[in-house]
Each structure stands twice: as C-alpha cells, then as structure tokens.
Amino acid sequence: MSLSQFGESEIIRLPIFPLPNVVFFPNTILPLHIFESRYRQMVGDAMDSDRLIGMVLLKQNLENPEVKGGDSFEVGGMGRITRCQEQEDGKYDILLTGRSRFRILKFERMAPYRIARVQLLEEHDPAPAVVDEVTPRLIAAFKETIHRQAADFDFNLLDELDFATLVNSICSSLDIDDHSKQELLEMNDLGERARNLLTILSHLLLRKRMVSRFDHLRPRDPSVN
C-alpha cells in the first residue's frame, strides 16, 4: 500500500514495534533483524496484509538509564517491508522503507504485539526559496561533518535527493542522541526541521574543529597512552 492510497491525516490501524534506540524517518531505509517470537508473528502478519509497521522510540527511565521504560513516544515512523528474508529458525531479516510519520491515538491491544490506531502526519514543505537557500548549506555542513568517517561515500548523490529525503536522511544518519532525533521527527514543518538540523550540524562541526586542534598531541603509536 503506497502513501498515495492514504488520505490527508488519515487514521489507520497499525502494528507497533517499540525499540529503545531507533528513530525512524520518512524516506529512509531501516534494516532489522527480527528474533523475538511476538515480533516474528508481527512480521508474518504484516507480510500477509499490507506490509506496514510502525516504529516508535521507547522512553528510558531517567533515574536509571539502564532500565528501559515501557512507555513510548507518541510520534513514530511508519514503514513498508520492501525486503523480507525468513531464516530456517523462523527469524527474519527485513528492510523497512519509511513512508510517513504518525501519532499514536490509542492502543487497541498490547499482546502478543502492540496494535494502535494512529493518525498519519503530513510533512509540510517549505517555500521554494527556503529550499534553495537551505539545501546547499545542509549538504556542505554534512560533508564537512562526516567526510573522514565516510571516505568512500559518494557525496554527489546528495545533490540528486529531493528536499524531504535529504533532510530526513541526514537526520537519520547523524551520530546524535535519540531524544534529539525524536525532537526532529516531531517537527511537522520540514523547513523547521532543516533549520534545527543546521544548528545541530554547526555544533558538531564546532566540536570537531576544537578536537582537531589537539590532534598533534595524540601519540602516533596506539600502544602509548
């Protein structure tokens, strides 16, 4: 089922997969290894239906970060299973392609896996002038941020992406904390998300430049502390 088959802000029934370390954006790809029996059942049921799954970030226990809370954030990302490989032991390797954001309205059941009624959330595109102004800044800042860690990455591909895919792909790939990603995901306006993303990239670049000033102090021999 494609997004074009959904109406504006439509309310649908959706299986929910909560994880403590995944924030799933539209227009991005998420590989998952499914091993728990309840989520193996979820994938099997989805494959027999519309192949749609909703990913939500679990909230952590702030007093004890090692203990994962049972509550999730209300806003998540819906994806369609575009690749599914079932292993001999019943586990799955799947690929989710991000379709839309959603807000959980009500859980209809919690076992064996969660199913909720959700409202799909639109992504509001900024004016063309904003896109033209922000896009080259985003690409330049992202290149400078990750060029050492991704030496083999073809940065020319970024120029071929539409604005929504560019913004959401950078949000997904940045090495920042999950709550910061969640805040980006909950922004309905892509222009606002892009501007906040530029601020995050600026902070990352500033930190990177400060660290690089002390590169000459690092021992060349990794065995030397």
Image (cartoon, rainbow, N blue to C red):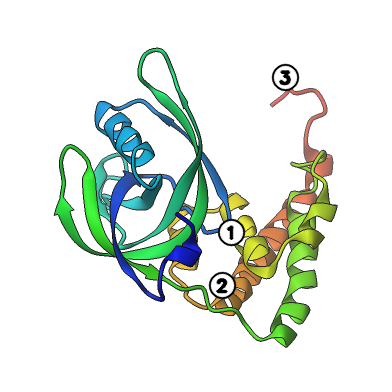
Residue 223's tag is 3
Q: Is there CB contact under 8 Å for labels 1 and 2?
A: yes
Between the residue at mark 2 and the residue at mark 3, the CA separation in whole angstroms equals 43 Å
Q: What element carries label 3?
A: loop
Residue at numbered disc 1: 171
Question: Quadrant location of the C terminus?
Answer: top right
Q: Classify mark 1: helix, strand or loop.
A: helix
How many other residues sit within 10 Å of disc 3, few (<14), some (14-19) or many (≥20)?
few
Report x, y in % for residue 4.
50, 66
Q: Earlier in the sequence, mark 1 or mark 2?
A: 1
Gap in angstroms between the C-alphas marked 1 and 2: 9 Å
Name the spot of residue 220 as percent of width and height, x first: 83, 28
Decide: is 174 above or below 120. Answer: above
Q: Residues within 10 Å of mark 2 (few under 14, many from 20)?
A: many
Task: Return the x and y of residue 196 as percentages of the image width and height.
Answer: 58, 73
Residue at position x 34%, y 44% in the image? 49
